[in-house]
Amino acid sequence: CSLRLVFISFLPTKHSLSLSPSQNSKNTQGLVGLRNLGNTCFMNSILQCLSNTHDLRDYCLRNTHRIDLNNNCRAKAALMEEFAKLTQTLWTTASNEAVSPSDFKTQVQKYAPRFMGYNQQDAQEFLRFLLDGLHNEVNRGSLRARTPVEDFDHLSDDEKAKRMWNKYLEREDSKVVDLFVGQLKSSLTCSECGFCSTVFDPFWDLSLPIAKSSGEVTLNDCLRLFTKEDVLDGNEKPTCQRCKAKRKCTKKFTIQKFPKVLVLHLKRFSEARVKTAKLSTFVNFPIKELDLRQFASDNSVNAIYNLYAVSNHTGTTLGGHYTAYCRNPSSGEWYTYNDSRVSPMSSSQVRSSDAYVLFYELTNCSRM
């Protein structure tokens, strides 16, 4: 749900230490903070998570994005340019002094006016807007001719999924899609005749409901809740393609195509009758070897992920602050990013009840 309340940004704690200025530039690569421009911790948190996304970082550092920008001349490229420039600064500056993301924020506001001003915003919503904006500016598919609409219903599920994925790439094809987009399979089974219809849709992230439990809640519990079979009855009855009538059906999600970078959003904010409430449930998630094969359409695929970044939200809906925990892709060490402050941390500290958006990378980097 959309979080539109104004937050109060907390100041970094006295225990949040800056890296020593005596360290050389190689040791400070990627360990540079971002200044808070006024309630912009939500933006800083997401930027640090993306800066530590290995392939996206390299895409910017090697200026490969310029090739896609040049080939996509109809797009205004200021957002991608500022993002790349900021990423390059975080990874090449000889100083560990915090940098200002003000030029980047200016371009964000032009692309998405809802982020104008200095009110606190929802980090996951910002991530979606940002990835969409970056993708649009380096979209290789925007210049391609469209092929006619085809009917894939007569094909097997696997063939239908491939055709629909290729159809999607005709329109939406960028480095951002290469990294972040997967494919979800939705199966609808008629309780009357047993006919099963399938739909395949791209996804940029998965928003997971937080399971209710008297004991420990795990990430797998949340994924099971997301993929559990739902009964559609009463006013929700869909029309069965075979019966040609509204029928009670069961609906289930599975993951057809796993993205290289899997973004999992824990739905901590819920709209109550009077106000927005926050769930502070501790969700236990693995740092290494998150095995998602049980949620795959085909459980023989590679679906093992390692965590590399977390966007955290501390506080309540009335006053909160965003930070990031990221594993440096060069050293493999974990660090806390708290606006201007960057400090080393242990991997044992990464799990907390503040975890809001989780970033996982597929262990085998080759695409399916």
Image (cartoon, rainbow, N blue to C red):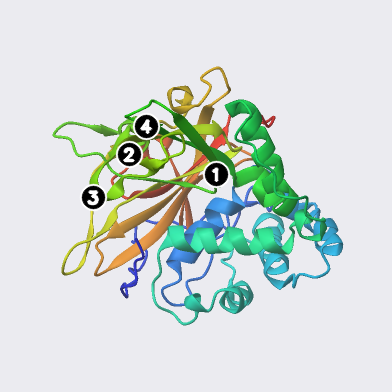
Q: Which residue is mark 4?
A: 190
Is residue 3 or residue 230 the one in the foreground?
230
Closer mark to the observer between disc 4 and disc 1: 4
In this rendering, the answer to whether 18 lies above or below 156 is: below
Q: Which residue is mark 1?
A: 201
Outermost residue, left direction?
214
Is residue 119 or residue 324 the one in the foreground?
119
Type of amino acid under label 1: Asp
Residue sitting at x 59%, y 45%: 181
Callout 2: 10 Å neighbours few (<14), some, many (20+)?
many
Element assignment for label 1: strand
Element assignment for label 2: loop
Type of amino acid under label 3: Ser
Cβ atoms under marks 2 and 4 closer than 8 Å: yes
Q: Which residue is mark 3?
A: 280
* Residue 41, percent from left and from top: 44, 66
Type of amino acid under label 4: Cys
Residue sitting at x 53%, y 79%: 113
Q: Earlier in the sequence, mark 4 or mark 1?
A: 4
- On residue 137, the disc is none
In this rendering, the answer to whether 35 lies above or below 194 is: below
Type of amino acid under label 2: Arg
Residue 213 located left or right of residue 227: left
Regarding residue 340, the answer to whether it shows in the image is: no
Regarding residue 229, the answer to whether it shows in the image is: yes
Q: Check the picture and name the quadrant holding the C terminus.
A: top right
Cβ atoms under marks 3 and 1 closer than 8 Å: no
Q: Which image quadrant is residue 328 in?
A: top right
Q: Which residue is mark 2?
A: 247
